[in-house]
Image (spheres, helix red, strand yellow):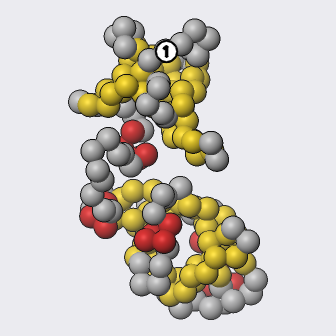
Amino acid sequence: MEFIEIGKIIKTHALKGELSVASNSDFIEERFKVGATLYVKQNGIMKELEITSVRFHQNNILITVNNLNDINLVTHLVGLTLYVNRDQLPELAENEYYYSDLIGLEVFATTNEYIGKITDVLEYPHGSILEIYNEDKKILIPFVDAFVKDIKDGKVMVELIEGLV
């Protein structure tokens, strides 16, 4: 199985075993619903969790897993990354990408100049940013059509403007 990161358990909420989740998925209602299967990695082993309740509270996603209704039964999950099986993901339309598929891709300017490799995709209210490293230099490029011209064959072609790199 191939696993895709979709979020992180950031803290417990109250005393009844609820976990507060920070999602990095655009499919929140699909990922975090009763009956959905999530995975966490503990001691190098992927462990399955089933969401048994979910609610949204003050811009937070609160879930209960495996009917664990006591804070003492879930504190060991805090800080763990949440994953889904890649087979559970919906097919994307053309020119849509899962962020995890972009990590590690090489980035080139439209002039074929090597820029670096994508190390992360950062989410901000105004849009996504590609974080690119070249040796010890970090470069941030907005993930919008004006800059990202093409993605294919493991390469990302970007249009650079003066001062961007």
Look at 58% across and 23% down and name the residue there: 138
Of 149 and 154, the residue lying toward us: 149
Residue 151 sits above or below residue 5 on the image: above
Residue 63 in which image quadrant? bottom right
Q: Is residue 45 visible?
A: no
Furthest residue toward left: 153
* Left or right of residue 77: residue 134: left
Q: Position of residue 91 (x, y in %)?
A: 27, 57
Look at 37% across and 31% down and name the residue there: 105
Q: Position of residue 38 (x, y in %)?
A: 43, 72
Residue 116 sits above or below residue 24 on the image: above
The residue carrying pointer 1 sits among few (fewer than 14), some (14 to 19) or many (20 or more) residues within 10 Å by Cα, namely some
Q: Position of residue 15 (x, y in %)?
A: 74, 87
Q: Which residue is mark 1?
A: 160
Of 77 and 126, the residue lying toward us: 126
Q: Look at the image and tell me in which quarter the C terminus lies.
A: top right
Residue 50 in which image quadrant? bottom left
Look at 62% across and 72% down and name the residue there: 61
Residue 36 sits above or below residue 41 on the image: below
Q: Secondary structure at mark 1?
A: loop
Look at 58% across and 45% down and name the residue there: 123
Of 66 and 46, the residue lying toward us: 66
Residue 84 in which image quadrant? bottom left
Q: Position of residue 145 (x, y in %)?
A: 43, 31
Q: Look at the image and tell me in which quarter the N terminus lies.
A: bottom left
Query: Number of numbered discs present?
Result: 1
* Left or right of residue 21: residue 92: left
* Left or right of residue 115: residue 70: right
The amino acid type, in three-letter code, at marker 1 is: Leu
Q: Is residue 163 visible?
A: yes
Of 95 and 120, the residue lying toward us: 95
